[in-house]
Image (cartoon, rainbow, N blue to C red):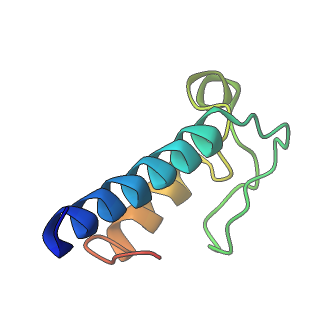
Amino acid sequence: MDDADRATDLEEARMTAAMAQIAKVMTTVNPAQECDSVLDSCDGFIGEARKKAVPSATRCTACQTEFDKLFKGVKRL
């Protein structure tokens, strides 16, 4: 096995670990009904339909939309 093969194996292992972590977070239910946003326009409540569709949601639909616009194209670690 050469260096390129070892590098590929390492990258695949890192990707698998990252995907497992993402899957865990995506399935974690957030019981809070309050929006975790600092936007002034927020009513402070995550609607029941949103919580049903996205149990891990921490922002209301309006705040999540604004958040997505603000951070579009920004990579997170």
Res. 27 image quadrant: top right
Quarter holding the N terminus?
bottom left
Position in image of residue 41 (x %, y %): 60, 66
Q: Residue at x 32, y 54 (%)?
A: 12
Q: Is residue 23 left or right of residue 1?
A: right
15 and 13: which one is in front?
Answer: 13
Res. 23 image quadrant: top right
Q: Is residue 52 left or right of residue 66?
A: right
Q: Residue at x 39, y 63 (%)?
A: 68
66 and 31: which one is in front?
Answer: 31
Res. 40 image quadrant: bottom right
Position in image of residue 5 (x %, y %): 18, 62
Position in image of residue 17 (x %, y %): 50, 52
Q: Disc count in the image?
A: 0
Position in image of residue 71 (x %, y %): 37, 74
Q: Residue at x 16, y 69 (%)?
A: 2
Q: Residue at x 62, y 73 (%)?
A: 39
Q: Is residue 53 above or below residue 38?
A: above
- Give the farthest residue toward the front: 1
Q: Is residue 32 above or below residue 3?
A: above
Q: Is residue 31 left or right of residue 69?
A: right
